[in-house]
Every structure is written in C-alpha cells, then in structure tokens.
Image (cartoon, rainbow, N blue to C red):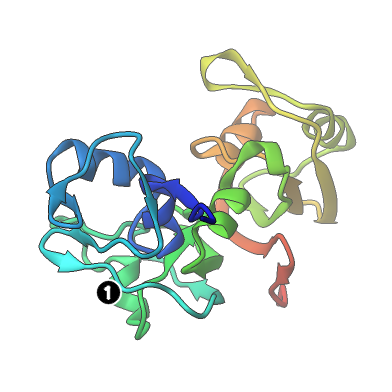
Amino acid sequence: MEKKEDVRLNKYLADQGVCSRREADRLIESGKVFVDGSPAGLGDRITMEMQVVVNGKAVTKVTKKVVLAFYKPEGVTCTEKDEHAEITITEYIKYPIRVTYAGRLDKDTEGLLLFTNDGDSSHKMMSPKSHIEKSYYCLLRKEIDSADVKKLCCGVKIENNYMTAEAEVEVVSKKEIILTITEGKYHQVKQMLEAVDNEVAYLKRVRFAFANLTLF
C-alpha cells in the first residue's frame, strides 16, 4: 500500500495561512489544536486527509495560493491582535481569505508589505538565509557624506554589537538615500543611520523581493 505523505503539524498550519510555525507551536502547547478529535502534540505529523481544528474551528485546506503587494500607511500597527493599537494591519486590509504579512513595518513607517496564505513562501521571505533584498527611502535629519555612505555599504555596528551585512546605498540628495539591506533586525535602518551619527526623519519601504513601489 502506498504511504500517504505527511507533514509536521506546525508547517501544515502555516501552509494553510492559520499562523506562523512559531505561533502554531504555542497553540499546540496550550491545547488549542486537535487532530481527528484528539489533542495535538508538539512535533506531530499529519496527512492531508486528517481533520485539524484550531480554537474550535476546523482548518479549511487552501486550494489557491495568494500573494499580495500592499501599501501600509503610517499609523497602522503590524500585528494581528493588539488591544492597544489604534488599528492593526489585519483590521485595515480586510481581505476575504486569511493572509499573513512577511516582514513587518513599524507603526510610524509606511511602504510595501507582502501578504500571502502560503506558509512556505512567507517563511522563505522572512528567513535571513534567503537574503531577500529590501529597499528603504530615507529622508535624513542631517546631510550625509561619502565616508558615511561607505560605512553603511561595508556594514556598521548596531544594537548588541551586531555588525550588519554589506548594503547598497543610492544617494538621491544630500539628505536623501535609498538603503538596500538583506537583513531584518529590529529598527535596523534607523539603527544603521544612528551608527553614522545621523537620524531618519521619514522612512518608506519601496522594494521587497520582487515587488517595487514608485518612489515619488
């Protein structure tokens, strides 16, 4: 008899757009995931024929993969649930099927976000191993010189003495640059500019992987 292909439960939930793999593990640990009527365990593997229930709701198998390029305005918080947020990204987008964002943006940052219901695609877009390029338009508080541009390109030390990877810098004007990075550390762009004694006055992500925004 042919063996039915199985997958890890946390990957399955991510692939169906329910949540990230990490969040899936938290749900499993908290007893909120059932497989064929029985409580699931960490590391469980399932086949596509099994019925999975999360928080009392059956998981609908995804038949069509969706990838959305979305312009996030300033003031919208990149989170699915936050009682303190004025408006969350999921409340703002209101897409008819569940999609999750890849590569969050700060509340005060606007620009390009990618959404998908494909867990594998989301994981690849967010994984540091993928070296996905992200470009940011930066309006600076002070003028930037060639020496500081060279430092940004070669890498600078930010929080916890972390040395950033090589980056690309396009100088638009004395106070405007487009910074392209392949990492996603917390507040990385802001920290990189602070490392060269400058400050971001305005920030907008204009490219993420295959998707681009018109700058002006």
Residue 116: percent from left, percent from top? 50, 68
Visible residue check, residue 175: no
Query: Looking at the picture, does residue 102 appear above or below residue 180?
Result: below
Please tell me how crowded label 1 is: few (under 14), some (14-19), or many (20+) other residues with Cα within 10 Å. Answer: few
Callout 1: SS: helix
Identity of the residue furthest to the top in this view: 161
Q: Residue, x 21% and y 45% (percent of image)?
A: 27
Left or right of 200? Residue 206 is: right
Pick the quarter of the image with the C terminus: bottom right
* Residue designated by label 1: 91
Left or right of 162? Residue 25 is: left
Residue 11: percent from left, percent from top? 44, 49
Res. 39 image quadrant = top left
Visible residue check, residue 145: yes
Residue 186: percent from left, percent from top? 49, 36
Query: Looking at the picture, does residue 112 appear above or below residue 157?
Result: below
Q: Say how many tags the image has.
A: 1
Amino acid marked by disc 1:
Glu
Residue 32: percent from left, percent from top? 13, 49
Q: Residue, x 10% and y 63% (percent of image)?
A: 56
Identity of the residue furthest to the bottom in this view: 96
**Nearer to the camera, 177 or 98:** 98
**Nearer to the camera, 185 or 141:** 185
Left or right of 51? Residue 12 is: right
Q: Residue, x 49% and y 58% (percent of image)?
A: 119
**Nearer to the camera, 149 or 37:** 37
Query: Looking at the picture, does residue 190 appear above or below residue 121?
Result: above
**Nearer to the camera, 161 or 103:** 103
